[in-house]
Amino acid sequence: MVSGVGVAVEFVQYFGGVFEPISFLLLLGGTIGGLILGATPGLSPTMAVALLIPFTFQLAPTQGLILLGAAYTSTVAGGAVSAILLKIPGAPANIATALDGHEMARRGEGARALHLSFMASGIGGVTGVLLLIFLTPVLAQWALAFGPPHLFWMAILGVTVIGSLDSNSFVKGLLSGCLGLWLSMIGYDDIQGAQRFIFHDALTGGVNIITALIGIFAIPQVINMFAKGRVHRAIDAVAVDRQPISSSAAELTTHTKPLAIGTLVGSVIGLIPGVGGQIAGLLAYDQTKKFSRNNESFGKGEPAGVIAAESANNAMVGPSLVPLLTLSIPGSPTAAVLLGGLLIHGIFPGSDLFENHPDVAWTFINSMLIGQVLMVFFGIWVASYAARVARIPSSIMAAAVLVLALFGAYSVQQSMGDVHVMVVLGIAMYVLEKFGFSAAPLVLGLILGPIAEANFIQGSMIAAAVDGPWDYFFTGSLNIALITLVVASILWSFFTSGRAAPVVGERSERAKSAEEVS
C-alpha cells in the first residue's frame, strides 16, 4: 500500500482513465440511473447495485466497478427526492431528510430543499472520497479496532437520540422508539435461533426494514391524501418553478455548522463496519439539532436538518469502502455486493489490491469522485422539475404513491407477505400519528435493535471466555469514549426535553402566504 506522495502520484496517473469514452458513458448512465432508482421507494442502494451486477459481466473490471460505484453514490442522494416531496424516504439513509425536507416542500420550497440536499450531498460525498484516497492506510487500521462491544455502544448511542427526534413530545418519542425495538425482535434470533413473536407466517423472517420503511412513511401519507380528495395542495407556484440555484448556494454558505457536523459524522460512521448511512444521517441530524440555537424549529421545515442529514449519508460512502478495499471486509451491505462485483472479475481486494491492480482500484476511486460532481449537476438540474410533483391533485398523487409502495414492498423479497406487513404497519402508524406519535423514532428503533442485540450477544459470548463482561464492555479507551458520548447524549436530551415546543400543526408566515397565492 502506497502512501503520502505515492498516493498523490497514482491518483493523478490513473485520473484520465475515468474519461475514456465507454467509462465516462457508464459513469453518466450509472449516475442518472442511480438518481432515478434512489427516488423510487423500496429500491435501496444495495438493491440498485445488485440489480446492475449482471450488466457488468461483459464489461472490463474497471468499467463494471465504475457503473456500480456511480449507482451507489447517486442512489444514496436520489433517495432525498421522494423523502422531500412525498415524505417517503427512498432508502433508510434518507429518513432524517424527510423530517424537515417534506415540511419545506409543503410550503412551496421543494426546489429549495432539493437544491440544498444535492449540494450538501456533493460536499459530503467529495470529502468522504478524498478521505478514502489519501487516508486509507491509517483509516483501515482504525476501522479494524471496532469489535462487538464498540458496535454495541454505537447502537446504544443511536438509541439515545430516539426521544429527541420527536420535537412534540420526548416521552412519545421514546415510546415510539421502544415500539420499533420490539418490532426488530420479531422473527428468529440470528445467533441462537430462538423463535420470537411470530404471529403469522409472513413474520417468520422478521420485519424487513425496507418494507417497514415504506409502510410506516407511505401508507399514512396515502390515507391523508385520499381524505383530501381532488384538492390541489397549497403551494407557492413561484417558489416551486423559479428557485434560483445561486440563492440556494448562497444559503448553503450560511449553514456551515450543519454541513461540517454532517460531513464529520458521516465520515466517521462510514468507517465502522456494519453501521450504515441511516445511522449517520440520524446522528448528524440529532447533533445538529442539539448544537443549534433554534432547535425548536427542527421538524418544522428547518434547512439545517436537510443539510446535515444529506451531507452525512453521502460522506459515509467513501469511508465505507476503506475496510473493503484494504482489508477485504465489506463495511456495509452495499460494500458486500461490490465485493461480489470484484470477485466475479477475479480481483480479490486486500492489502495488495493497489499493487496488483492499481489501474482498477484508482480508476474506480477517481470515478466515484467525479460521480459526486455529476450527481450534484444532474440532481440540481431535475430539482425544479421534480418539485412540480407537489402541484398534482392529492387523489392522483395518492394512487401513484400507493402503486409505488406496493411495488417497492413486493420487490424486496418477491413476497405478498411483505405487502401485508407493509399495509398493517402503515395503518397502525396512521392511528399512532393521530395520538401524536411520529414515525422517525420508531424506524430508528427498528434499525438499531438488531445491531445492538447481535453485538451484545456476540460480545457476551467472547467476554465469558476471557475477562468477563465488565472488562470487555466497560474498559478500554474506545469503550470509555463511546460510553461518555452515550451519557452526554442522554443528559443533553433530558435537559432540553423540557423546552417549549411549537404547537403541533403551527405554520410559518411563509406557509400561510403560500396558501393564499395558490
Image (spheres, rainbow, N blue to C red):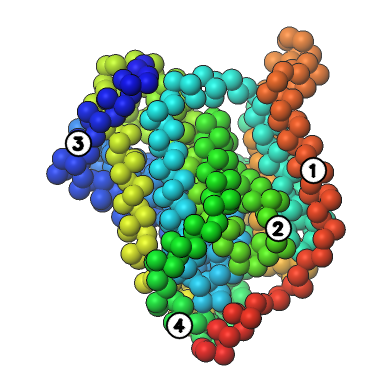
Give left or right: position of 151 versus 211: right
Mark 2: which amino acid? Arg
Q: Residue at x 83, y 49 (%)?
A: 494
Q: Dot 1 corresponds to which residue?
A: 490
**Which residue: 34% across, 40% down?**
368
Labels 4 and 2: the sequence-earlier one:
4
The residue beneath circle 3 is 16
The crowd level at tag 1 (other Cα within 10 Å; few <14, some 14-19, many 20+) is some
SS type, badge 3: helix
Q: Earlier in the sequence, mark 3 or mark 1?
A: 3
Q: Residues within 10 Å of mark 2 (few under 14, many from 20)?
A: few
Q: Disc 4 marks which residue?
A: 237
Q: CA distance from mark 4 to mark 3?
A: 43 Å
* Amino acid type of the residue that numbered disc 3 sits on in the rendered structure: Gly
Judge depth for marks 3 and 1 and give the one in front: 3
Instruction: Please tell me whether mark 2 sits on a helix, a strand or a loop.
Output: loop
Mark closer to the observer (2, 3): 2
Tag 4 near tag 2, CB within 8 Å: no
The quarter holding residue 102 reads bottom right
Question: Which residue corresponds to mark 2?
Answer: 293
> Can the viewer see residue 214 in this picture?
no
**Residue 25, image x and y in percent?**
20, 48
- Looking at the image, which residue sits at the far top? 466
Camera-nearest label, 1 or 2: 2
Helix, strand or loop under label 4: helix
